[in-house]
């Protein structure tokens, strides 16, 4: 997907003015928030599980090169072929070469965010391969050429009519608004793609170093089909998907499904270790695993930024973010949206061009509370803000002059001495009082954004410090225990 | 060029400042996986829309299959024959239902694949169950192929109750016990296939089976 | 009786002095002796959260020097307490000696309701109000400081009051400092929902514990729903204290 993170402000306005979008984004909020809380209650100690998984993610990242090597060794021993790709171009090239080298013309895909990073579908199509997304939501937005609305529900913003129209033109069905009927139509349409595809291409939810396995999580069954029938299975994963052990993997998956869709576990979890063994009736003859960097080792160098790699793509942060839940996914301008998008898009696409993503944060902190990876989003946003202010050559972040920087310098300079503070206060209060009408300020020549929706109160007649000083000088002994106090007489 | 990529990526990771945690000591005394309770399994499996039929023994399996499939008008059964159930009895059930009986064994590759996508019912054994989530688990190998439990619209899975584990943690222990001999795939099945991709409306049945019957034996 | 050092946010000093006065009133009613250090200015929160961490170093050091002799430092603003306790360590990370001193001071800084309930053990200040109120959970208190029971206990001990449920009480009000000015439509949308929830709750007054939330919500209500009120908990308590208290 071509990044459009610079268009955030524009797209926010579009989304807010789209009544249907707004309502939907809000519904998403309510539904996912509730589902997650409900599902977490099935743990005897949800907080402990959250800590365990966060610890596992953190430790795995500290041991990442060793885990990657172990994974490669075990996967290779099980018969898989493991490849390394520095960037999107290399990953696409590797995969396209495998597919075209075998003369394959049809590919079925499981949902994979990293394949969106690399635009793998386009690369394959340019090489003459037909690609079908197997996941229903991804299939729909793929056919419509639209960006996904939400990491879990890419097509939930579309009406039944829009989907029906698509299916009528694609499959010749009778028009219908029934989601079940539409799902069945897609099942029939995609079935022979699964049956005849030469290759199944998937992502990886979690990779296990100790066994060389890849774990895939789904509800629909398209991944199971794509990894059972086609002769070739290609799995594309980014470097951070590793954990050490099977138990860590299953624990993370259990927390992923609860955080993501409120399910104790998804309908299917596949733990795949190598291609099919001799004599097995199905499963791929060859398993190719492509491990991709695409910008991650660059920010891995920084111990604070490294935590961004703990993300397990559960989407819990989206469901609770006051910003995301009013504007939805496409507003974030790239594959990752919500608080997670405001962390990853700057790191993968560019901090300067993604500025609005992390600056449009109220700093409420609810994302941090629900994150299974224990990521401190607010710390990362603050780092990004610092990068834009001071520059950060290690990631190619340019220092950006900003009007509010001058104000901030003035502000902190003023605040760092009591007499400057009092002088500034006097001037400021005098300025504000000029605009008071009927006890409040309706507008100012500055800070106009505030007054779009709200007033400011008229400043109180005195500052607090003047009031305090006047009490002292009027011999009102504030420093005595007050008569009638709760503890008076004790 | 490919090995350059590997060295570059690993090199950058290795030279970064890291606080490598001490590795967990390998304990000598293995923890045994805990058994699961049938009532918990029944409740959880039903919660994910699987049907469960508890039968007393191996001899009752075929009848349970017949009861479930009668009235459904199925035309073909795709059966992974296994000594854990009586194939002859199942063949009779197929005849009673006027359905074709297809054993997965000894088919040519093409026929196997064609039948996998054409048959109405897949009948397989399951190697383990997990009570906490109502899951059945298949360790895929020569005797346990993958498609029969995913491509037909109906899946009947046969699970012996003594293979019921308590939780996912216990399943992880069982999987770890495979060590260097991991099966080519392990599938954890929890209910029927589903989606909520259209209008966030949850619907049962998508690409995988639309119906799942678990026959719990003993 | 105990002395308490007042940490008065700059927003309170400059715009909302009544809130400062109410804080003093409440503390005196609780039987402690508040005093005020006039050298204090601003904790630096706006600079830090905007990423101008360097500009806040001097302000952080000033705070430490001004307050470090005090045993109890009490503040009616969650965001300022959060700044001192959680953000100063980061601001001063390149100067470990200062960082240590800041951590020592921070351990003695309290949000007002936290101080009353957890330190003094006082939940009933002798206030009375006949009517319905609702409570908005400021992000800085709830999530950054873990303070949620204390304000509610103080409210529920107000004689005659009915604390009604507020839908999405723990959802942000949309202030976010600079955010409210830089992204007005987003802020307005979040704020609009907060106020809608308030109105639907049936409460006459919305209580809260942070001046930022107060300016934000009260500013909106003043323009759009002047029949309703949003008040800081301290101001509400102070204005509803009963005259006599049984000795």
Image (cartoon, coloured by chain):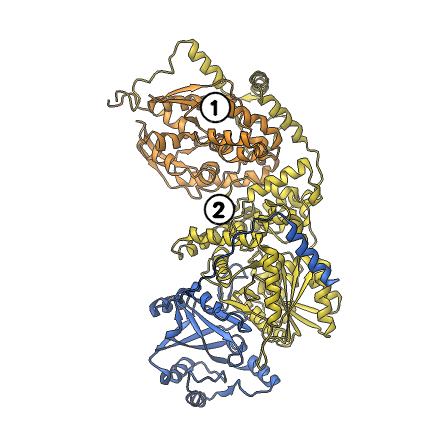
Chain colours: A yellow, B blue, C orange
- Residue B180 image position (x, y, % from top left): 54, 71
Q: Is residue A160 left or right of residue B39?
A: right
- Chain on which label 2 sits: A
Asked which secondary structure carries label 1, the reply is: helix
Callouts 1 and 2 on one subunit: no
In terms of depth relative to the viewer, which is nearer, A132 or A79?
Answer: A79
Label 1: few (<14), some (14–19) or many (≥20) C-alpha neighbours in 10 Å:
many
- Chain on which label 1 sits: C
Residue at numbered disc 1: C67
Kindly give the residue lying farthest to the front in the view shown.
B28
**Residue A205 seen from this side:** yes
Q: Are marks 1 and 2 in contact (CB under 8 Å)?
A: no
- Image-quadrant location for residue A383: top right
The residue at the point 71 percent across, 70 percent down is A98
In terms of depth relative to the viewer, which is nearer, A137 or A76?
Answer: A76
Kindly give the residue lying farthest to the top in the view shown.
A474
Residue at numbered disc 2: A369
Identify the image quadrant of the N terminus of chain A. Answer: bottom right
Asked which secondary structure carries label 2, the reply is: helix
Q: Residue B33 shows which numbered tag? A: none
Identify the image quadrant of the C terminus of chain A. Answer: top left
């Amino acid at each position: 997907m071509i990044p459009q993170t610079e268009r955030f402000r524009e797209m926010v306005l579009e989304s807010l003015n789209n009544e249907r979008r707004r309502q939907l984004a809000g519904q998403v909020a309510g539904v996912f928030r509730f589902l997650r809380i409900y599902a977490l209650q099935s743990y005897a100690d949800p907080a402990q599980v959250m800590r365990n998984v966060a610890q596992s993610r953190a430790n795995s990242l500290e041991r990442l090169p060793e885990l990657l090597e172990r994974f490669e060794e075990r996967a290779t021993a099980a018969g898989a072929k493991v490849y390394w790709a520095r960037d999107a171009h290399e990953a696409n090239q590797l995969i396209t070469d495998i597919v075209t080298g075998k003369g394959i013309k049809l590919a079925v895909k499981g949902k994979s965010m990293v394949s969106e990073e690399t635009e793998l579908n386009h690369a394959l199509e340019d090489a003459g391969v037909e690609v079908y997304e197997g996941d229903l939501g991804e299939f729909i937005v793929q056919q419509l050429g639209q960006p996904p609305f939400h990491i879990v529900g890419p097509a939930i913003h579309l009406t039944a009519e829009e989907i029906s129209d698509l299916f009528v033109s694609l499959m010749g069905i009778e028009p219908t608004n029934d989601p079940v009927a539409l799902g069945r139509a897609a099942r029939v349409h995609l079935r022979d793609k699964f049956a005849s595809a030469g290759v199944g291409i998937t992502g990886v939810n979690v990779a296990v170093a100790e066994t060389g396995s890849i774990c895939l999580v789904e509800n629909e069954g398209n991944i199971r089909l794509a990894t059972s029938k086609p002769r070739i299975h290609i799995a594309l994963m980014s470097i951070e998907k590793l954990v050490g052990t099977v138990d860590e993997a299953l624990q993370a998956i259990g927390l992923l499904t609860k955080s993501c869709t409120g399910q104790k576990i998804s309908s299917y979890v596949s733990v795949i270790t190598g291609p099919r063994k001799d004599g097995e009736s199905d499963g791929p003859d060859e398993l190719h695993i492509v491990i991709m960097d695409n910008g991650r080792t660059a920010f891995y160098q920084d111990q604070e930024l490294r935590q961004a790699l703990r993300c397990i793509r559960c989407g819990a942060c989206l469901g609770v973010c006051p910003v995301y839940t009013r504007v939805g996914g496409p507003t974030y301008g790239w594959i990752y949206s919500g608080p997670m998008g405001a962390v990853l898009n700057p790191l993968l696409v560019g901090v300067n061009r993604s500025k609005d993503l992390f600056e449009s944060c109220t700093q409420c902190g609810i994302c941090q509370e629900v994150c299974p990876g224990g990521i401190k989003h607010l710390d990362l946003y603050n780092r990004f803000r610092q990068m834009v202010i001071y520059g950060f050559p290690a990631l190619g972040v340019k220092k950006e002059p900003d009007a509010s920087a001058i104000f901030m310098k003035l502000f902190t300079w003023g605040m760092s001495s009591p007499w400057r503070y009092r002088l500034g206060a006097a001037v400021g209060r005098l300025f504000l009082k000029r605009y008071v009408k009927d006890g409040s300020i309706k507008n100012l020549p500055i800070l106009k954004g505030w007054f779009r929706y709200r007033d400011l109160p008229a400043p109180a007649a005195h500052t607090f410090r003047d009031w305090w000083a006047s009490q002292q000088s009027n011999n009102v002994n504030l420093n005595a225990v007050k008569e009638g106090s709760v503890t008076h007489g004790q | 060029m490919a090995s350059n990529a590997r060295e570059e990526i690993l090199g950058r990771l290795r030279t970064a400042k890291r606080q490598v945690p001490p590795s967990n000591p390998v304990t000598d005394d293995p923890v045994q996986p805990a058994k699961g309770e049938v009532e918990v399994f029944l409740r959880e499996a039903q919660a994910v829309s699987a049907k469960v039929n508890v039968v007393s023994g191996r001899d009752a399996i075929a009848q349970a299959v017949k009861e479930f499939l009668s009235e459904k008008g199925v035309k073909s059964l795709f059966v992974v024959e296994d000594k854990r159930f009586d194939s002859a009895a199942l063949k009779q059930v197929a005849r009673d239902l006027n359905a074709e009986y297809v054993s997965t064994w000894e088919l040519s590759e093409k026929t196997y694949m064609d039948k996998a996508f054409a048959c109405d019912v897949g009948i397989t054994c399951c190697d383990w169950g997990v009570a906490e989530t109502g899951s059945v688990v298949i360790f895929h190998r020569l005797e346990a192929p993958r498609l029969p439990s995913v491509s037909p619209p109906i899946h009947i899975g046969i699970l012996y109750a003594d293979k019921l584990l308590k939780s996912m943690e216990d399943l992880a222990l069982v999987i770890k016990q495979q060590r260097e001999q991991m099966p080519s795939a392990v599938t954890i099945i929890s209910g029927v296939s589903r989606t909520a991709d259209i209008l966030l409306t949850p619907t049962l049945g998508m690409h995988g089976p639309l119906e799942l019957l678990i026959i719990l034996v003993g | 009786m105990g002395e308490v050092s007042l940490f008065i946010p700059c927003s309170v000093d400059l715009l909302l002095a009544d809130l400062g006065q109410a804080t003093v009133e409440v503390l005196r009613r609780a039987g402690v002796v508040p005093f005020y250090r006039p050298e204090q200015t601003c904790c630096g929160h706006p600079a830090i959260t905007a990423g101008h961490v360097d500009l806040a170093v001097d302000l952080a050091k000033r705070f430490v020097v001004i307050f470090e002799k005090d045993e109890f430092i009490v503040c009616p603003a969650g965001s300022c307490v959060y700044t001192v306790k959680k953000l100063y360590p980061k601001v001063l990370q390149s100067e470990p000696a200062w960082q240590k001193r800041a951590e020592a001071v921070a351990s003695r800084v309290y949000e007002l309701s936290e101080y009353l309930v957890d330190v003094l053990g006082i939940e009933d200040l002798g206030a009375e109000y006949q009517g319905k109120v609702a409570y908005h959970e400021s992000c800085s208190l709830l999530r950054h400081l873990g303070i949620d029971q204390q304000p509610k206990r103080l409210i529920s001990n107000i004689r005659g009051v009915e604390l009604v449920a507020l839908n999405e009480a723990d959802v942000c009000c949309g202030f976010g400092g600079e955010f409210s000015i830089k992204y007005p439509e987003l802020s307005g949308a979040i704020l609009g929902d907060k106020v809608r929830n308030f109105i639907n709750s049936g409460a006459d007054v919305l209580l809260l514990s942070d001046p930022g939330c107060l300016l934000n919500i009260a500013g909106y209500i003043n323009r759009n729903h002047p029949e309703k009120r949003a008040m800081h908990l301290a101001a509400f308590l102070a204005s509803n204290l009963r005259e006599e208290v049984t000795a």
